[in-house]
Amino acid sequence: MSNLEQTLSIIKPDAVKRNLENEIKEIFRNKDFNIVNEKKIQLSKLEAEEFYKVHETKPFYDDLCAYLSSGPIVVMVLEKENAIVANRELMGATNPKDAKDGTIRKKYGISIDKNSVHGSDSIENAKIEIDFFFKN
Ligand code: CDP
Ligand code: MG
């Protein structure tokens, strides 16, 4: 049965700074993700705090939000069969040290905080995150 899904992907500031935007998009396209919406923006600290609200009790929350708002990011809606899980697999583990060969974080991630990409982790969060960036 077909299960076409959309997920939210972010190319984070460390990767945009290193001009990896086109390379990372090519990886998604080669894995049959369609980029159905995209924009390059810079979030304010407050907007980053809203985006990462699920993590507000975590010790890394403040640094995480400062980092996400530290430079331009590329936000994309990716569409594919089972896109949410497929994107999580292609991204690799949160800590690039633990990420498997062939994953984006293994290839480009610098550290657990500068891990180059974000991807929604559930159907519910994908919808919330897509609306966060693309609902007018
Ligand atoms: O991004 P992912 O869903 O894989 O991980 P998360 O657990 O939802 O954490 C969100 C982001 O917080 C991660 O991508 C890391 O950049 C950052 N983080 C961190 O800086 N230190 C940690 N111990 C855990 C996560
Ligand atoms: Mg997450």
Image (cartoon, rainbow, N blue to C red):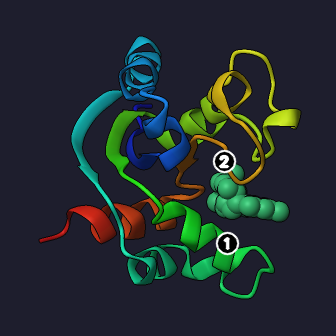
- Left or right: where 132 falls relative to 53: left
Could you tell me the amino acid type at mark 2?
Lys
The answer to whether residue 53 of the structure is visible from this angle is yes
Q: Is residue 70 left or right of residue 121?
A: left
Q: Write down the residue under mark 1.
A: 63
The residue drawn where x is 48% and y is 67% is 124
Please state the horizontal and vertical placement of residue 97, each as a whole percent of the image: 87, 34
Query: Which quadrant holds the C terminus?
Result: bottom left
In the image, taking residue 111 as reference, residue 121 lies left or right, namely: left
Q: Can residue 12 be seen?
A: no
Whole-percent x and y of residue 52? 55, 74
Please determine whether, in this image, residue 27 is positioned above or below residue 72.
Answer: above
Is ligand 1 less than 8 Å from the beta carbon at label 1?
A: yes
At a point 42% along the width and 84% down the height, the residue shown is 46
Of residues 30 and 106, the one nearer the viewer is: 106
Whichever of callouts 1 and 2 sits on the residue coming sooner in the sequence is 1
Quadrant position of ligand 2? bottom right
Q: Amino acid at mark 1?
A: Asp
For this orientation, the residue located farthest to the right is 98
- The residue beneath circle 2 is 114
Tell me if the residue at label 2 has its CB under 8 Å from ligand 1. yes
14 vs 58: above or below: above
Residue 90 x/y as whole percent: 61, 28
The local secondary structure at tag 1 comes to: helix
Quadrant of the image occupied by residue 103: top right
Spatial CA span between label 1 and label 2: 11 Å
- Residue 118 image point, x, y percent: 55, 49
